[in-house]
Every structure is written in C-alpha cells, then in structure tokens.
Amino acid sequence: MKKKQIKPGPHLGLLTLGQSPRRDVIPSFEGILGKRLTLIEAGALDGLGNEQINALLPGPLETGIQTRLAGGSEIFLSKERLLPYLIEKAVFLGNRCRYVVLLCSGDFPALRSACSGLLEPVIILRGIIKTLAGQKTLGVIGPASDLKSAPEQWQPYAGKVVCAAASPYAPVEQAAIASKSAVNQGAQVLLLDDMGFNQEHRAQARKAVDVPVICATTVTARVLTELI
C-alpha cells in the first residue's frame, strides 16, 4: 500500500533590510511557530556586491537605518536608497508566500502597496503598546541611531516615553543594562524595539527588571500563530 504524500505547509516570507539568512532571528520564529510553516528568507542586500552596498550609505540629509549583514556585522544605510531593493524582495516573497513579515519595526508605507500579504510589526506593536502603556511610561530599547525619532513615534501610544540604547547585534547583556537604565528613568513597560532582538534578549531584560518586557520579534511571531 502506497504511503499518502504529505503536502508541504504554507510558506512564510521573512524580509530583512540587510542580508539573509538571519540566524539571529530564525530560532525565535521556529521556537514559537514550530514546523507549521516553511520559512523563506530574502534580504534587500542579497546579491549585491560591496560597491553596490557602499552606494547605499546615507548622505547628510537622508534617514539612516541600521541592519545586519549575513556575517553578523552591523551596517548603517540610507532608508530612502534601500527602499527600491526592499520592494523588489517583498514582491519576490509575496509571489511565493501567504504572508511576508518585515523584519524591522520601523514604518515603510511604500511596501504595503507593493506586497499585499505584508505584515508590519510596527502596526501590531502600536495596538499592544497602546493597551499596556496608554497611561504609563514606556521605555523604548533600541539602537542609538533609532532613538532620536522613538519618542515622536511612540508618544501617541503611551503616557510618556523614555529611551535607552542597546544594539541587538552587541553582547546580549546590553539589553539588560539598557532595561535597567529605562526603568531608572521611570519606565513601567519596556519595548525591545528592533527585530534583531530575540528571545534571549527578552529573557535577559526580564531578569534585570520587574516590569513587562515586550519584544518586537517574539510578539510578531505569536500573532502569526493566530493566522496559521
């Protein structure tokens, strides 16, 4: 008797601003989603040479954004110049996957029209932060380059916003140090506001402070469990 063939499960696209694979983030998604989805990764910088990548470095009047290369090193790029490459990879994933998760908690409105199945963590996080910190002090933890705009971004969803810098690509203990700094400034709820933060960063932060810690990556993965 022939064995019944098992069809592969639905595909989930993971879209990163830098290069894939994202070995720092994938374990968090797999740990929460299990094997129900086939993960397909693509990065805006995939296939680009050093000269092409260097051409994306930000000018003095451009918005800079931090991301990660495949080898694990950080790179700071122009958000405006990166966008066409990001849209190209979003379309690639959108043609192959039911959903595409943007591995960035920043706001990229132009991607929404390019990829109808796009899930933006920032949209998910706004509702959660509004519920948990609407009348409280929110502590935003993220790369120093992102914190200048963080108060304006999150003020509509919290009573007050304070910030502390920590890179997800630095030693994980930085997340705990930054969390203590934010709590010392009065934070009652913490947000690890970068998709490079993972379960280990959240665990370290939670051990260091006695307030709720919301991690952009793990929250997004948990919302996905309701969709699949």
Image: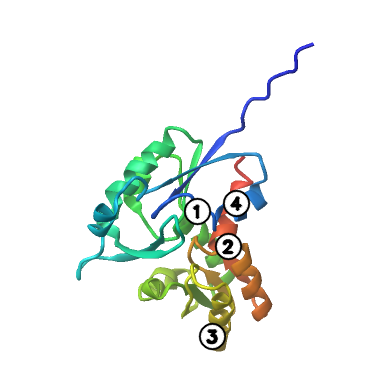
Question: Is the residue under label 1 in contact with that under label 4 (CB below 8 Å)?
Answer: no
- What amino acid is found at the position of numbered circle 1 in the picture? Arg
Residue 171 in which image quadrant = bottom right
| Residue 97 in the figure: left or right of residue 49 | right
Give residue 163's position: percent from left, percent from top.
Answer: 46, 79
> Looking at the image, which is closer to me, 49 or 139?
49
For marks 3 and 1, the one nearer the N-term is 1
Q: Residues within 10 Å of mark 2 (few under 14, many from 20)?
A: many
Residue 185 in the image: above or below residue 225: below
Q: Which residue is mark 4?
A: 29
Q: Secondary structure at mark 4?
A: helix
Give residue 93's position: percent from left, percent from top.
Answer: 43, 38
> Looking at the image, which is closer to me, 137 or 21?
21
- What amino acid is found at the position of numbered circle 4 in the picture? Phe
Q: Residues within 10 Å of mark 3 (few under 14, many from 20)?
A: some
Give residue 148's position: percent from left, percent from top.
Answer: 36, 76
Q: Which residue is mark 3?
A: 181
- State which mark lies toward you, 2 or 3: 2
Give residue 142's position: percent from left, percent from top.
Answer: 46, 72
Q: Which residue is mark 2?
A: 198
Q: Do we see residue 200 in this rendering?
A: yes
Which quarter shows the N terminus? top right
| Residue 157 in the figure: left or right of residue 80 | right
Q: Residues within 10 Å of mark 1 (few under 14, many from 20)?
A: many
- State which mark lies toward you, 3 or 1: 1
Please tell me which residue is depicted at 54% across the width and 54% down the height of the picture.
Answer: 23
For marks 4 and 1, the one nearer the N-term is 1
Question: Is the residue under label 4 in contact with that under label 2 (CB below 8 Å)?
Answer: no
Total marks placed: 4
Q: Which residue is mark 1?
A: 22
Please tell me which residue is depicted at 58% across the width and 34% down the height of the picture.
Answer: 10
- State which mark lies toward you, 2 or 1: 1
